[in-house]
Structures are given as C-alpha cells and as structure tokens.
Image (tube, helix red, strand yellow):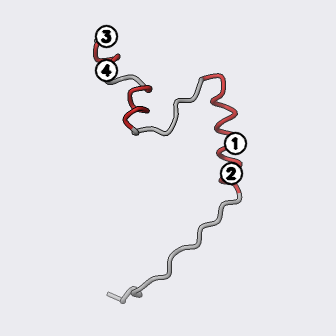
C-alpha cells in the first residue's frame, strides 16, 4: 500500500505527468476557488450556430 501511494496516489506524480494543472496547498484552497468562480461569474460563451435544423419526426 505504501509503494502504491508513493507511485500512483500522489498528487505530485499526477502533476509531473500533466494529468492536473497544479497542486493547491490546503490553506489556499478557499482563496483559489473564490478567484476561479469570480472569473467565471461574468463569462459568456456564444453557442455555435446550428448547421442543420431538427426535422419533425
């Protein structure tokens, strides 16, 4: 179990392999989440136009 945790269940290994963007220190988690949600509050994404309409079935 110890070897598995060191080799697989380790956030730093996942970060090195590119599976996650960053490892957040637990005391900074709340601040990071608030910053991320603030950035998304006013985000507006336009839906792509449809190429084909829906036909009645």
Q: CA distance from mark 1 to mark 2?
A: 6 Å
Which residue has dot 1 on it?
Answer: 35
Q: Give the mark, 4 or 3, whose residue is nearer the N terminus.
A: 3
The residue depicted at 57 percent of the width and 29 percent of the height is 24
Report the residue marked by disc 2: 39
- Residue at disc 4, secondary structure: helix
The quadrant where residue 44 appears: bottom right
Estimate the x, y position of residue 49 in percent, counting from the top left: 50, 81
The quarter of the picture where the C terminus appears is bottom left
Residue of label 4: 7
Q: Residue at x 52, y 30 (%)?
A: 23
Mark 4 near mark 3, Cβ–Cβ under 8 Å? no
CA separation in Å, label 3 and label 2: 39 Å
Estimate the spatial distance between the alpha carbons at disc 3 and disc 1, rounded to whole Å.
35 Å
| Residue behind mark 3 | 2
Answer left or right for 24 relative to 6.
right
Q: How many marks?
A: 4
x and y percent of residue 32 in the render?
65, 36
């Amino acid at each position: 179990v110890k070897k598995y945790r060191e080799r697989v269940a380790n956030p730093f290994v996942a970060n090195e392999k590119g599976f996650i963007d960053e490892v957040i220190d637990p005391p900074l988690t709340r601040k990071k989440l608030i910053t991320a949600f603030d950035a998304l509050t006013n985000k507006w994404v336009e839906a792509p136009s449809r190429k084909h309409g829906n036909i009645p079935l």
